Image (spheres, rainbow, N blue to C red):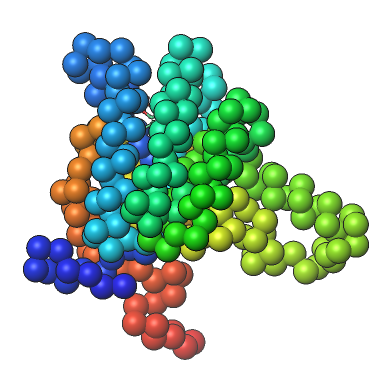
Amino acid sequence: MQGTIDGVTYEIPRHIAVIMDGNGRWAKKRLMPRGFGHRQGGKTLEQACEDVWHLGVQYFTVYAFSTENWKRSVEEVTGIMNILRNYLKTAAERCNRENMRMRVIGDRTILDADIQSEIHRVEEATKQNTGLQFTVAINYGGRDEIRRAMVKIAKEVEEGKLSADAVTDEVIKNHLDTWELPDPDLLIRTSGEERISNFLLWQLAYAEFYFTDVLWPDFDRKCFIDAIKYYNSRDRRYGGVKDDKKIRK
Ligand code: FPP
């Protein structure tokens, strides 16, 4: 879909995914503990939801906590979980005010029981909302998501509900945590790292990647506009050729 930013028309990515990296370095630069960076990262995220929606983005998915992040110190993990806890407490009210729907992807079954029930409450309370479709990845890993989808499919095959030959790309997509979402058009990773770190491995197949040195807590509306401009400079072909002209041999 097209949108106008500062008087110029751009193709706006329908779905933007973000690896919010650099919170720790942002805090270190200020001689502050890492948790300070995560707290600021949380504030940046709240503003980001407003910014992307006003820029015309419909789906926004962020990586808040990976299946690998448990390797961090107990203090840091507890700090991130507490930021999530606090965020979730007011999320339903905030989302409803903005007509925003919130979903969580990842394996939530090992999260603390109170976080699991808050997630359920927010998802239920916002499921009618038609504005920004906001998704937070918590205890998420792309390989783990694919593995869990494979287990579900294998069980359906075992129970005779599905034949093995009927397992198409579409069937796999429909068993992923993101089954209701279109694939991201644009992936942004902040802080200079250029990896996807197990994020949305299936879904990013045709996404454009935008890497920037900006640390996540500093990522503002102008940074999103720069990313959208970069996206507009790309020529998306999905494995075909430009202008859909077929090459005939
Ligand atoms: C990566 O930076 C960031 C994280 C692992 C945590 C992201 C979490 C938040 C922004 C908290 C808010 C979430 C919600 C849903 C409210 P890093 O710690 O790896 O930074 P570094 O590479 O500079 O050390």
Q: Is residue 211 visible?
A: no
Tell me where residue 106 sits by quadrant.
top right
Vertical side of 27 occupied by 167: above or below: below
Tell me where residue 241 sits by quadrant.
bottom left
Vertical side of 14 occupied by 144: above or below: above
Outermost left residue? 7
| Place of residue 12 in the rendered image (x, y in percent of width and height, measured from the top left) | 28, 65
Q: Is residue 131 visible?
A: yes
69 or 89, nearer to the observer? 89
| Residue in view at x 76 percent, y 51 percent | 152
74 or 184, nearer to the observer? 74
| Place of residue 173 in the rendered image (x, y in percent of width and height, measured from the top left) | 62, 60
Outermost bottom residue? 248
| Residue in view at x 17 percent, y 69 percent | 4
Whereabouts is ligand 1, in terms of quadrant? top left
| Place of residue 114 in the rendered image (x, y in percent of width and height, measured from the top left) | 58, 28
Vertical side of 110 occupied by 130: above or below: below
* Left or right side of 2 for 237: right
Q: How many marks?
A: 0
User: What is the quadrant of the N terminus in the image?
Assistant: bottom left
* Left or right side of 173 for 152: right
| Residue in view at x 50 percent, y 41 percent | 137
| Residue in view at x 25 percent, y 32 percent | 217
| Place of residue 34 in the rendered image (x, y in percent of width and height, measured from the top left) | 33, 17
